[in-house]
Protein backbone atom coordinates (compact mmCIF):
# COMPACT_ATOMS: atom_id res chain seq x y z
CA UNK A 1 0.00 0.00 0.00
CA UNK A 2 1.51 3.35 -1.01
CA UNK A 3 2.14 6.12 1.48
CA UNK A 4 -0.57 8.73 1.82
CA UNK A 5 0.00 12.41 1.16
CA UNK A 6 -1.04 14.88 3.87
CA UNK A 7 -4.75 15.59 3.60
CA UNK A 8 -6.37 19.05 3.63
CA UNK A 9 -7.95 18.05 6.95
CA UNK A 10 -4.50 17.51 8.50
CA UNK A 11 -3.32 20.88 7.20
CA UNK A 12 -6.44 22.58 8.57
CA UNK A 13 -5.99 20.81 11.91
CA UNK A 14 -2.73 22.72 12.29
CA UNK A 15 -3.62 25.99 10.57
CA UNK A 16 -6.96 26.70 12.27
CA UNK A 17 -5.74 26.53 15.91
CA UNK A 18 -2.80 28.78 15.07
CA UNK A 19 -4.94 31.36 13.29
CA UNK A 20 -7.55 31.14 16.06
CA UNK A 21 -4.95 31.74 18.77
CA UNK A 22 -3.54 34.76 16.94
CA UNK A 23 -6.99 36.22 16.26
CA UNK A 24 -8.35 35.70 19.74
CA UNK A 25 -5.24 37.15 21.39
CA UNK A 26 -5.67 40.27 19.24
CA UNK A 27 -9.34 40.51 20.22
CA UNK A 28 -8.53 40.13 23.90
CA UNK A 29 -5.75 42.72 23.70
CA UNK A 30 -7.43 45.32 21.51
CA UNK A 31 -11.14 44.47 21.26
CA UNK A 32 -14.03 45.42 23.54
CA UNK A 33 -15.22 43.15 26.37
CA UNK A 34 -12.04 41.03 26.34
CA UNK A 35 -13.44 38.33 28.64
CA UNK A 36 -16.74 37.98 26.75
CA UNK A 37 -16.40 38.87 23.07
CA UNK A 38 -14.37 35.79 22.04
CA UNK A 39 -16.84 33.41 23.66
CA UNK A 40 -19.85 35.04 22.01
CA UNK A 41 -18.12 34.79 18.64
CA UNK A 42 -17.34 31.13 19.23
CA UNK A 43 -20.92 30.44 20.29
CA UNK A 44 -22.18 32.03 17.07
CA UNK A 45 -19.71 30.02 14.98
CA UNK A 46 -20.80 26.77 16.63
CA UNK A 47 -24.45 27.59 15.98
CA UNK A 48 -23.77 28.23 12.29
CA UNK A 49 -21.74 25.01 12.07
CA UNK A 50 -24.55 23.00 13.68
CA UNK A 51 -27.04 24.28 11.11
CA UNK A 52 -24.59 23.54 8.29
CA UNK A 53 -24.07 19.96 9.52
CA UNK A 54 -27.83 19.37 9.56
CA UNK A 55 -28.03 20.61 5.97
CA UNK A 56 -25.28 18.32 4.66
CA UNK A 57 -26.77 15.31 2.80
CA UNK A 58 -25.89 11.83 4.07
CA UNK A 59 -23.33 10.09 1.82
CA UNK A 60 -23.61 6.52 3.15
CA UNK A 61 -26.49 4.09 3.14
CA UNK A 62 -28.06 3.35 6.53
CA UNK A 63 -27.48 -0.12 7.94
CA UNK A 64 -27.97 -1.79 11.32
CA UNK A 65 -25.29 -1.77 13.98
CA UNK A 66 -25.12 1.87 15.03
CA UNK A 67 -24.47 1.10 18.70
CA UNK A 68 -21.87 -1.55 17.89
CA UNK A 69 -20.04 0.91 15.64
CA UNK A 70 -19.64 3.29 18.59
CA UNK A 71 -17.60 0.76 20.55
CA UNK A 72 -13.98 1.98 20.39
CA UNK A 73 -11.44 -0.40 18.87
CA UNK A 74 -7.72 0.19 19.15
CA UNK A 75 -5.07 -2.22 17.95
CA UNK A 76 -1.56 -2.17 16.54
CA UNK A 77 -1.23 -5.02 14.01
CA UNK A 78 1.61 -7.42 14.62
CA UNK A 79 3.46 -6.40 11.46
CA UNK A 80 3.41 -2.72 12.54
CA UNK A 81 4.44 -3.14 16.18
CA UNK A 82 8.20 -2.84 15.64
CA UNK A 83 7.85 0.35 13.62
CA UNK A 84 5.28 1.70 16.08
CA UNK A 85 7.69 1.15 18.99
CA UNK A 86 10.55 2.86 17.14
CA UNK A 87 8.37 5.84 16.20
CA UNK A 88 6.79 6.13 19.66
CA UNK A 89 9.28 8.62 21.22
CA UNK A 90 8.77 10.98 18.28
CA UNK A 91 5.01 10.45 18.38
CA UNK A 92 5.12 11.58 22.02
CA UNK A 93 7.55 14.47 21.59
CA UNK A 94 5.70 16.17 18.70
CA UNK A 95 2.27 16.59 20.33
CA UNK A 96 3.86 17.24 23.73
CA UNK A 97 5.56 20.24 22.15
CA UNK A 98 2.26 21.50 20.72
CA UNK A 99 0.47 21.00 24.04
CA UNK A 100 3.17 22.93 25.89
CA UNK A 101 2.90 25.94 23.59
CA UNK A 102 -0.90 25.93 23.66
CA UNK A 103 -0.95 25.88 27.47
CA UNK A 104 2.14 27.62 28.81
CA UNK A 105 3.46 29.24 25.62
CA UNK A 106 1.72 32.62 26.12
CA UNK A 107 3.03 32.95 29.69
CA UNK A 108 6.51 31.94 28.54
CA UNK A 109 6.36 34.51 25.73
CA UNK A 110 5.59 37.28 28.22
CA UNK A 111 8.52 36.19 30.37
CA UNK A 112 11.07 35.81 27.56
CA UNK A 113 9.97 38.73 25.40
CA UNK A 114 9.41 41.06 28.33
CA UNK A 115 6.17 42.46 26.90
CA UNK A 116 2.68 42.36 28.43
CA UNK A 117 1.07 42.46 24.97
CA UNK A 118 -1.11 39.34 24.71
CA UNK A 119 -0.66 39.13 20.95
CA UNK A 120 2.82 37.71 21.51
CA UNK A 121 1.21 34.69 23.19
CA UNK A 122 -1.04 34.14 20.19
CA UNK A 123 1.92 34.60 17.86
CA UNK A 124 4.00 31.78 19.38
CA UNK A 125 1.05 29.39 19.03
CA UNK A 126 0.58 30.57 15.44
CA UNK A 127 4.27 29.97 14.72
CA UNK A 128 4.14 26.39 16.02
CA UNK A 129 0.95 25.47 14.19
CA UNK A 130 1.60 27.55 11.08
CA UNK A 131 5.14 26.29 10.50
CA UNK A 132 3.87 22.74 11.06
CA UNK A 133 1.20 23.22 8.38
CA UNK A 134 3.72 24.84 6.03
CA UNK A 135 6.04 21.86 6.47
CA UNK A 136 3.21 19.51 5.46
CA UNK A 137 2.84 21.38 2.17
CA UNK A 138 6.53 21.98 1.47
CA UNK A 139 7.64 18.41 2.21
CA UNK A 140 4.61 16.48 0.96
CA UNK A 141 6.71 14.77 -1.70
CA UNK A 142 9.23 13.41 0.82
CA UNK A 143 8.88 9.75 1.80
CA UNK A 144 7.54 8.86 5.22
CA UNK A 145 10.80 7.40 6.53
CA UNK A 146 12.84 10.44 5.49
CA UNK A 147 10.17 12.78 6.87
CA UNK A 148 10.16 10.95 10.21
CA UNK A 149 13.92 11.23 10.58
CA UNK A 150 14.08 14.83 9.36
CA UNK A 151 11.15 15.86 11.55
CA UNK A 152 12.77 14.48 14.69
CA UNK A 153 16.08 16.18 13.90
CA UNK A 154 14.39 19.50 13.14
CA UNK A 155 12.36 19.16 16.33
CA UNK A 156 15.57 18.66 18.32
CA UNK A 157 17.13 21.72 16.66
CA UNK A 158 14.08 23.88 17.37
CA UNK A 159 13.84 22.79 20.99
CA UNK A 160 17.56 23.41 21.55
CA UNK A 161 17.17 26.90 20.06
CA UNK A 162 14.17 27.56 22.29
CA UNK A 163 16.00 26.25 25.33
CA UNK A 164 18.92 28.58 24.66
CA UNK A 165 16.51 31.47 24.16
CA UNK A 166 14.80 30.79 27.49
CA UNK A 167 18.15 30.76 29.26
CA UNK A 168 19.37 33.98 27.59
CA UNK A 169 15.98 35.76 27.32
CA UNK A 170 16.59 36.30 23.60
CA UNK A 171 13.33 37.27 21.87
CA UNK A 172 14.59 36.63 18.32
CA UNK A 173 15.99 33.19 19.19
CA UNK A 174 12.79 32.28 21.02
CA UNK A 175 10.57 33.09 18.03
CA UNK A 176 12.94 31.42 15.57
CA UNK A 177 13.25 28.30 17.72
CA UNK A 178 9.47 28.14 18.06
CA UNK A 179 9.02 28.21 14.27
CA UNK A 180 11.70 25.55 13.71
CA UNK A 181 10.27 23.30 16.42
CA UNK A 182 6.79 23.69 14.90
CA UNK A 183 8.08 22.54 11.51
CA UNK A 184 9.57 19.48 13.19
CA UNK A 185 6.28 18.81 14.99
CA UNK A 186 4.25 18.72 11.77
CA UNK A 187 6.85 16.75 9.86
CA UNK A 188 7.62 14.13 12.51
CA UNK A 189 4.04 13.11 13.24
CA UNK A 190 1.86 13.76 10.19
CA UNK A 191 4.41 13.36 7.38
CA UNK A 192 6.54 10.82 9.21
CA UNK A 193 5.00 8.50 11.79
CA UNK A 194 1.48 8.55 10.35
CA UNK A 195 2.68 7.79 6.82
CA UNK A 196 5.09 5.00 7.72
CA UNK A 197 2.57 3.25 9.97
CA UNK A 198 -0.67 3.26 7.98
CA UNK A 199 0.66 1.27 4.99
CA UNK A 200 1.69 -1.53 7.36
CA UNK A 201 -1.92 -2.34 8.25
CA UNK A 202 -4.37 -4.31 6.13
CA UNK A 203 -7.63 -2.69 5.04
CA UNK A 204 -9.44 -4.10 8.06
CA UNK A 205 -6.69 -3.09 10.49
CA UNK A 206 -6.11 0.54 9.57
CA UNK A 207 -8.90 2.02 11.70
CA UNK A 208 -7.55 0.39 14.86
CA UNK A 209 -3.99 1.46 14.06
CA UNK A 210 -5.00 5.07 13.37
CA UNK A 211 -7.01 5.06 16.61
CA UNK A 212 -3.96 3.82 18.53
CA UNK A 213 -1.79 6.51 16.92
CA UNK A 214 -4.13 9.32 17.86
CA UNK A 215 -4.66 7.99 21.38
CA UNK A 216 -0.90 8.34 21.78
CA UNK A 217 -1.12 11.79 20.19
CA UNK A 218 -3.77 13.18 22.52
CA UNK A 219 -2.34 11.58 25.64
CA UNK A 220 1.04 13.13 24.81
CA UNK A 221 -0.72 16.40 23.99
CA UNK A 222 -2.42 16.61 27.39
CA UNK A 223 -0.77 14.57 30.15
CA UNK A 224 2.73 16.13 30.06
CA UNK A 225 1.36 19.69 30.17
CA UNK A 226 -0.86 18.82 33.12
CA UNK A 227 2.26 17.69 34.93
CA UNK A 228 4.08 20.82 33.74
CA UNK A 229 1.25 23.01 35.00
CA UNK A 230 1.56 21.48 38.45
CA UNK A 231 5.34 21.83 38.30
CA UNK A 232 5.05 25.56 37.56
CA UNK A 233 3.35 26.13 40.92
CA UNK A 234 6.28 24.50 42.73
CA UNK A 235 9.35 25.31 40.63
CA UNK A 236 8.33 28.31 38.53
CA UNK A 237 7.73 28.73 34.80
CA UNK A 238 11.37 29.21 33.82
CA UNK A 239 12.67 26.04 35.46
CA UNK A 240 9.69 24.00 34.25
CA UNK A 241 10.17 25.20 30.67
CA UNK A 242 13.87 24.30 30.75
CA UNK A 243 13.24 20.76 32.01
CA UNK A 244 10.29 20.25 29.65
CA UNK A 245 12.32 21.42 26.63
CA UNK A 246 15.22 19.16 27.57
CA UNK A 247 12.87 16.17 27.88
CA UNK A 248 11.42 16.90 24.43
CA UNK A 249 14.90 17.08 22.92
CA UNK A 250 15.84 13.72 24.47
CA UNK A 251 12.66 12.06 23.19
CA UNK A 252 13.07 13.36 19.65
CA UNK A 253 16.76 12.44 19.60
CA UNK A 254 15.92 8.94 20.87
CA UNK A 255 13.36 8.55 18.08
CA UNK A 256 15.87 9.65 15.43
CA UNK A 257 18.60 7.40 16.83
CA UNK A 258 16.40 4.32 17.11
CA UNK A 259 15.02 4.92 13.64
CA UNK A 260 18.52 5.10 12.16
CA UNK A 261 19.54 1.96 14.04
CA UNK A 262 16.49 0.06 12.82
CA UNK A 263 17.12 1.05 9.19
CA UNK A 264 20.76 -0.06 9.36
CA UNK A 265 19.97 -3.33 11.10
CA UNK A 266 17.19 -4.38 8.69
CA UNK A 267 18.17 -7.62 6.93
CA UNK A 268 19.33 -7.09 3.36
CA UNK A 269 16.91 -8.16 0.65
CA UNK A 270 13.81 -7.82 2.77
CA UNK A 271 11.31 -5.34 1.35
CA UNK A 272 10.50 -2.53 3.73
CA UNK A 273 6.79 -2.93 3.27
CA UNK A 274 6.59 -6.70 3.37
CA UNK A 275 5.68 -8.94 6.27
CA UNK A 276 7.41 -12.00 7.62
CA UNK A 277 5.58 -15.18 8.47
CA UNK A 278 5.69 -14.26 12.17
CA UNK A 279 4.19 -10.87 11.41
CA UNK A 280 1.16 -12.09 9.49
CA UNK A 281 -2.26 -11.48 11.03
CA UNK A 282 -3.29 -14.02 13.63
CA UNK A 283 -6.66 -15.82 13.59
CA UNK A 284 -7.81 -13.33 16.23
CA UNK A 285 -6.88 -10.46 13.88
CA UNK A 286 -8.87 -12.09 11.08
CA UNK A 287 -11.87 -12.64 13.39
CA UNK A 288 -11.76 -9.02 14.53
CA UNK A 289 -11.67 -7.87 10.93
CA UNK A 290 -14.70 -9.99 10.04
CA UNK A 291 -16.57 -8.65 13.08
CA UNK A 292 -15.74 -5.07 12.13
CA UNK A 293 -16.24 -5.25 8.39
CA UNK A 294 -18.21 -8.37 7.58
CA UNK A 295 -17.05 -11.47 5.73
CA UNK A 296 -16.31 -9.52 2.55
CA UNK A 297 -15.03 -6.35 4.16
CA UNK A 298 -11.37 -7.29 4.04
CA UNK A 299 -9.16 -8.85 1.44
CA UNK A 300 -8.12 -12.43 2.27
CA UNK A 301 -4.60 -12.42 3.66
CA UNK A 302 -3.04 -14.20 0.68
CA UNK A 303 -4.59 -11.73 -1.73
CA UNK A 304 -3.38 -8.81 0.41
CA UNK A 305 0.08 -10.37 0.48
CA UNK A 306 0.03 -10.76 -3.31
CA UNK A 307 -0.82 -7.08 -3.73
CA UNK A 308 1.89 -6.12 -1.26
CA UNK A 309 4.47 -8.12 -3.22
CA UNK A 310 3.46 -6.29 -6.39
CA UNK A 311 4.01 -2.94 -4.68
CA UNK A 312 7.37 -4.00 -3.19
CA UNK A 313 9.04 -6.27 -5.77
CA UNK A 314 12.00 -8.22 -4.51
Image (tube, rainbow, N blue to C red):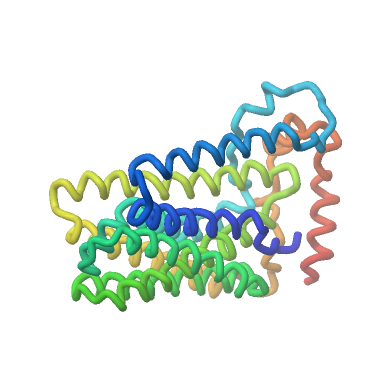
**Left or right, 21 with reference to 58:** left
**Left or right, 308 with reference to 151:** right
Q: Residue at x 80, y 55 (%)?
A: 305
136 and 4: which is toward the camera = 136
**In the image, residue 117 lies at what x, y percent?**
28, 61
Q: Residue at x 63, y 34 (%)?
A: 50
**In the image, residue 290 lies at what x, y percent?**
77, 33
**In the image, residue 148 lies at what x, y percent?**
54, 68
Above or below, 152 relative to 7: below
117 and 283: which is toward the camera = 117
The answer to whether residue 92 is seen in the rendering is: no
Q: Residue at x 62, y 39 (%)?
A: 49
85 and 21: which is toward the camera = 21
**In the image, residue 144 lies at what x, y percent?**
62, 67
184 and 53: which is toward the camera = 53
Answer with the quarter of the image where residue 246 lies: bottom left
Which image quadrant: the C terminus? bottom right
**Left or right, 110 with reference to 284:** left
**Left or right, 139 with reference to 161:** right
Above or below, 236 relative to 38: below
Q: Residue at x 56, y 41 (%)?
A: 45
Answer with the quarter of the image where residue 15 lies: bottom right
Answer with the quarter of the image where residue 90 lies: bottom left
The answer to whether residue 63 is seen in the rendering is: yes
Which image quadrant: the N terminus? bottom right
Amino acid sequence: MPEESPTPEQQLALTVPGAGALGTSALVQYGPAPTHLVWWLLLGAFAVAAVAVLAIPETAARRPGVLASLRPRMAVPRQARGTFAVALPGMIAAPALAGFYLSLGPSLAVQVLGSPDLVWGGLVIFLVAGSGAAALVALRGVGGAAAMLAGCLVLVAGVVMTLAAIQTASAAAFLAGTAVAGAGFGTAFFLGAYRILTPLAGPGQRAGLIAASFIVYYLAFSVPVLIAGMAVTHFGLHQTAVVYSAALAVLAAAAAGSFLFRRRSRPAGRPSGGTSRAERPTPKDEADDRADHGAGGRLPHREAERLGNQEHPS
